[in-house]
Amino acid sequence: MPLSEEQVLKMKQKRETILQQAILLFAERGYDDTTIAKVAKASGVSFGSVFTYFENKDQLFHAAVTEPLQEHSVKLLDFDPQASELLLELERMVTNHIKMFAAFDLYLRLVVQVVGYYNRFPYSFAELDAFHNIFREKIAELLVNGQQKGLLHVQDPKYVATAYMSLLIGLRVNLTDEPQSNMWEKFVPVAMQLFGPKNS
Amino acid sequence: MPLSEEQVLKMKQKRETILQQAILLFAERGYDDTTIAKVAKASGVSFGSVFTYFENKDQLFHAAVTEPLQEHSVKLLDFDPQASELLLELERMVTNHIKMFAAFDLYLRLVVQVVGYYNRFPYSFAELDAFHNIFREKIAELLVNGQQKGLLHVQDPKYVATAYMSLLIGLRVNLTDEPQSNMWEKFVPVAMQLFGPKNS
Amino acid sequence: MPLSEEQVLKMKQKRETILQQAILLFAERGYDDTTIAKVAKASGVSFGSVFTYFENKDQLFHAAVTEPLQEHSVKLLDFDPQASELLLELERMVTNHIKMFAAFDLYLRLVVQVVGYYNRFPYSFAELDAFHNIFREKIAELLVNGQQKGLLHVQDPKYVATAYMSLLIGLRVNLTDEPQSNMWEKFVPVAMQLFGPKNS
Amino acid sequence: MPLSEEQVLKMKQKRETILQQAILLFAERGYDDTTIAKVAKASGVSFGSVFTYFENKDQLFHAAVTEPLQEHSVKLLDFDPQASELLLELERMVTNHIKMFAAFDLYLRLVVQVVGYYNRFPYSFAELDAFHNIFREKIAELLVNGQQKGLLHVQDPKYVATAYMSLLIGLRVNLTDEPQSNMWEKFVPVAMQLFGPKNS
DNA sequence: CATGAATGAGCCTTCATTCAT
DNA sequence: TATGAATGAAGGCTCATTCAT
């Protein structure tokens, strides 16, 4: 007896609810302090149901870490390393990244957890790391471009890209302010400095 | 009958061993995944002995976070914000900081944990935060000085200082390389850019 | 999906089994020497199941003390302080009480424990104490009645009632004989003396 | 090297202090809730010293139960079952017993504990039981005497003696009042009734 | 003899996971 | 599929006891 379409939809929604609550709790309290029972309660389902949608706690955590990555990565990679107005593009990108990182709050706590204990979550880490590399390479490409055009001081693009990523993550770890706070924007020019813009 | 001097020394060493192993495990595996039994085993003592030296797991964690802070903070604050050769002093400072953060590896994982879950470790966080403020203020002082002398582009020193701290922490989170790696030095000029040196 | 009626019944029975075994063990060995594991084993369930039915050890003990009280108190208060044939009623009552106390064995050991360490079990004690007061007052009412009718020597009813209760408890503490023993009945006339019947 | 007399005296005193504190704590908190460390602290010695004077915790408890018995038993048996003025002697005895039981407070808590859990403390119980028998027999002797003289109603002396002992213990369990309270005396006439004095 | 560091048995409790309904 | 009772591994912690100093 195949499930009705409505059934399937309901299940998808239930799975999504559980995943969102898992992200919330894993991010706020960490892996061990988050119990299946808490996730279930927050999702309004019995804890048995969590096991219907996710094989076990590890899988749930892995899903919480990797599934949002698809969506976020698109936004984070939404800049043009070959843009003609390179400095403008750079500033637009940095502004967007800073805003995103301010808003990602929860998810980034999760990322920090995985990256910080990469030996404990090797599979989740591997996926995050893969994205990091893509991200850094695209940033590096933009940098090389800017340096060739004489708009940026010459620095090793690899290290600048890594430093940039690190700055974004470090800010998220360090700042406990609300994402709405306009304080975040203040960091845009500071972050820009990393790239060594000549006219400043 | 007071303990012999030799006894006291032995105990101090044992406490130190336990603390070091605790730092190692807490840093590598996180608070919850680190059990008293694991710490004891790594230290070569029975788990009962851990309770001889630390009241409970919380206290042990707190000690692991705050005791090294004393030593590290001295080194981190070892720069002169009123130096006459300001750019040189800045570079020296950044170089030292980068080296230190490369070496701190373990300890900084601990810091990230506390900062990331500050609501879970409020007392440990308070002590770290107090140091952060001192650190940022001293960096800001140096910055103001450099800007007044016309050596640095004018930026809000508060945000630059926070960004600098964030960059250092972010690098440590992001990089899993050995501290011996000379890769770390490559970040010195990049980090310098944050401060907006004019002649570069 | 609510549990089937059969399920609910099974659970009630299981809870009852655990409670009975808890009463048995708490009574025979005391609070501290009774472990959850022992209760579980005696009940034929895993120790984890005990926590399904009782929040923790304290709650289990409290339930063991207070739940039987409801049932017992009805029986203990089953006498008529305004009876016309007062001496007959008195004798009936004493006979019943002695029989009950002989049979209560286990439960009364529990009561002695709570009363003896009332500062350790304040909530359980409070419930027992409330019943004590009701019991003594009803006894006192009967006494006053008998004294007014000239059937009993005049004594302070409050003290007689307390002494009567104490005698019952003291007998239970002192005697380790089986409740079936007809020895218990022998105490009926002795206990009667406490009330000071005139024709004896 | 034999110990000096002074040494021996000091040790005796230390043993006595430990024993007294043990009685206090065992009585107030029960066997399991009383730790060797607490006894040692209350006695102003290191917990290691407790083991110098008592083989282990069980022995300490046994000593706390049985050693005071010698002294108390003398007082409890201080009445003359062959007294010529029998009713006067009876009243004197009851008054003394009631006063003693009011004052024994602590020690009787210990007794109740042992008697209540006789299967847990079989050796201590055996010694208490031996005294109980002696006590009851002497009481019975006095009773028989009184009954033969026609001063007391005829009742089975064995049961009266047991009831009397039970009343004393029951009162101690039931009453939490201070021994100084003059409330205790009020129970003397009530207790007297147990023996069935004719002229009352 | 006095001390207290060291040890590990054993306790209560939490929680992931299984599985009958 | 949904539920939650049942289970037992594992953790933090207490405390009696041993024994070196």
Image (cartoon, coloured by chain):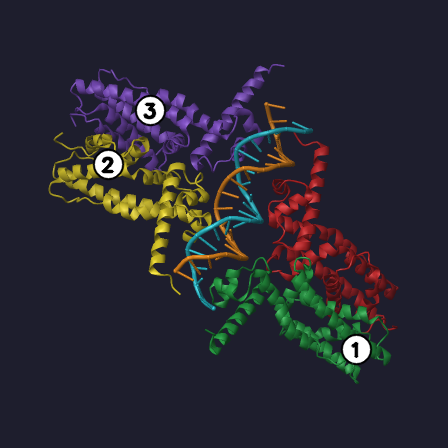
Chain colours: A green, B red, C yellow, D purple, E orange, F cyan
Label 2: state its secondary structure. helix
Instruction: Report whether B135 appears left or right of B57.
Output: right
When asked about the image quadrant of residue A74, the answer is bottom right
- Left/right placement of residue C173 relative to residue B15 reads left
Label 2 Cα crowd, 10 Å radius (few <14 / some 14-19 / many 20+): many
How far across and down, in percent of the image, does residue C119 sit?
41, 42
Would you say the residues marked 3 and 1 are in contact, meaning their CB atoms lie under 8 Å apart?
Answer: no
Tag 1: residue type? Leu
Residue C106 or D108: which is nearer the viewer?
A: C106
Q: Is residue B81 visible?
A: no
- Residue on which the image places disc 2: C98
Can you say which quadrant of the picture contains the N terminus of chain B?
Answer: top right
Percent position (x, y) of residue D150? Answer: 15, 20
Cβ atoms under marks 2 and 3 closer than 8 Å: no
**For the view shown, which residue lies furthest in the bottom direction?**
A84
In the depicted structure, whether residue B144 falls above or below residue B70: below
Secondary structure type for disc 3: helix
Image check: B56 left or right of D64? right
Q: Residue at x 38, y 47 (%)?
A: C18
Which of the pair C189/C142 is nearer the observer? C189
- Residue A127 pos. (x, y %): 68, 67
Q: Amino acid at mark 3?
A: His
Query: In whole angstroms, how far apart are the C-alphas of marks 3 and 1?
Result: 98 Å
Residue at left offset 67%, top offset 65%: A173
The disc placed on residue D132 is 3
Please check whether the numbered discs 2 and 3 fall on a single chain: no
* Relative to A168, residue C45 above or below: above
Residue D18 visible: yes
- In three-dimensional space, the C-alpha distance between marks 2 and 3, rounded to whole angstroms, equals 21 Å
Question: Could you give the CA–CA distance between mark 2 and mark 1, rounded to whole angstroms?
Answer: 96 Å
Left or right of C157 on screen, residue A145: right
User: In the image, which disc is placed on residue A142?
Assistant: 1
